[in-house]
Amino acid sequence: MKHVQQVQVASVFTIEIDGNPTLAFEAKNMTEARGLCKEQWLLEDLGALSSGGSALCGVGAKLAVRRATEGESHVYREAERSVPASDDLVLAYLVELDGFDHQG
């Protein structure tokens, strides 16, 4: 009897902070994607980073997850290609981050 192994294809999702598309990432499904919004390390990182002089995620900010648009998926795929292959989660920021020199 042959066993067929199903391959789970990941999708690209976007986290919006207060309605602003902020970062794109890959997850297996919406449940997994929503779970990322509850991760303390991510909330701390988003609170420490800023764009245009404002924190990405202030106290009381509303985070929402949705499937990424075609353009957001493209930004994610470009970011994914620019880092060494690993099992680490790739986060592609969709906003300019203060203090980072984007060359490439």
Image: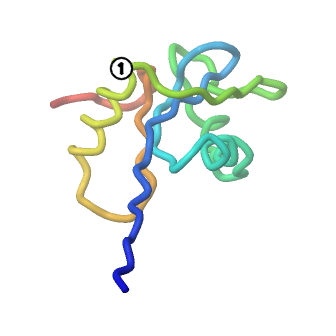
What residue does disc 1 label?
70
Q: Does residue 81 sit above or below 56 in this rendering?
A: below
In the rendered view, how is the structure colored? Answer: rainbow
Left or right: residue 71 versus residue 65 is left
Q: Mark 1 packing: few (<14 Cα in 10 Å), some, or many (20+)?
A: few
Q: Which one is in front, 60 or 66?
A: 66
Left or right: residue 59 versus residue 68 is right
Seen as rendered, the residue at the extreme right is 60
- Quarter of the image holding residue 99? top left
- Quarter of the image holding residue 55? top right
Q: Position of residue 31 (x, y in %)?
A: 67, 45
Q: Position of residue 103 (x, y in %)?
A: 19, 29
Number of numbered discs on residues: 1
Q: Residue at x 44, y 40 (%)?
A: 11
Q: Position of residue 45 (x, y in %)?
A: 60, 43
Seen as rendered, the residue at the extreme bottom is 1
Q: Residue at x 72, y 51 (%)?
A: 40
Q: Does residue 84 sit above or below 73 in this rendering?
A: below
- Image quarter hosting the C terminus: top left
Badge 1 marks a residue whose secondary structure is helix
Q: Residue at x 77, y 23 (%)?
A: 61
Identified by mark 1, the residue type is: Glu
Left or right: residue 68 versus residue 7 is right
Q: Residue at x 52, y 28 (%)?
A: 67
